[in-house]
Image (cartoon, rainbow, N blue to C red):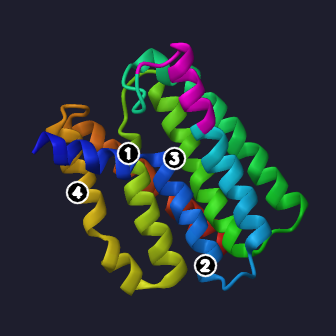
Amino acid sequence: MKRFARIVSAIFNPVLYIGLFLLYLIVGSHGQLWGPSLTAFLFLGALPAGLLFYGIHRGWWSDIDISRLHERRTYLPWVLLSAIIMFAIALLFHYPRIFRFTLTGILAWLAITTVVSWYWKISIHEGAAVGVVALMWFLYGSSWGLGLIWTPFLVGWARLELRRHTFAQLAAGAGAALFSMGVAWLSLHA
């Protein structure tokens, strides 16, 4: 079971999972959002992943999960900065509402996660899984949301099985994501 849990954790790694979600926006928009989607993928997928692997290679971080609390304090602020830059680009170039909504949710989630991770180990995996389900639900309807509802449960199981998180850390990650997507939804309808 541990091997399967490791596979689940790798597949649903937040950088990969959010990156795949952003690439889906390209496919789902039938090519109308190539520029914004690729820019978002660069700032929210490729740059954080590149920094993560470079940092692991240099010995700054121990593993792909950034398991140690002090490592999160040095990695997450850079990811948050990248998201802030992406959000500024979206505003400056008047990206479509779908992107402002998505980026507001991701930015709020990253801000909460970064602050909490300064003091406590919140589950970033669970937050990403819940956040993507909420985004898909808001953007594409309940059929997508219900179709993906199993992913947070699978990710939560894997993180518990690997003893990477406690139930409270998983619940906090899910709560941060739900709160952030709620903020994004409210900002879209304000």
Asked if the residues shown at circle 2 and circle 3 are in contact, with their CB atoms under 8 angstroms apart, the answer is no
Q: Is residue 21 above or below residue 156?
A: below
Question: Upstream in the sequence, badge 3 or badge 1?
Answer: 3
Query: Which x, y percent locates residue 6?
Result: 25, 42
Residue at 78%, 44% (x, y): give it: 85
Residue at 35%, 45% (x, y): give it: 10
Q: Is residue 14 left or right of residue 43?
A: left
**Mark 3 sits on what residue?**
15
Query: Which x, y percent locates residue 45?
Result: 60, 49
Question: Upstream in the sequence, badge 4 or badge 2?
Answer: 2
Asked if the residues shown at circle 3 and circle 1 are in contact, with their CB atoms under 8 angstroms apart, the answer is no
Q: Is residue 182 left or right of residue 96?
A: left
Residue type at mark 2 is: Val
Residue type at mark 3 is: Val
Residue type at mark 4 is: Leu
Q: Residues within 10 Å of mark 4 (few under 14, many from 20)?
A: some
Q: Residues within 10 Å of mark 1 (few under 14, many from 20)?
A: many
Question: Upstream in the sequence, badge 3 or badge 4?
Answer: 3
Residue 52 visible to the viewer:
yes
Mark 1 or mark 2: which is in front? 2
Residue 76 visible to the viewer:
no
What is the number of the mark on residue 27? 2
Q: Is residue 186 left or right of residue 120?
A: right
**Magenta residues?**
50-62
Query: Which x, y percent locates residue 111?
Result: 58, 40
Query: Which x, y percent locates residue 105?
Result: 58, 58
**Mark 4 sits on what residue?**
154
As measured in the structure, the alpha-carbon distance from the residue carrying label 3 to the one carrying label 1 is 9 Å
SS at badge 2: helix
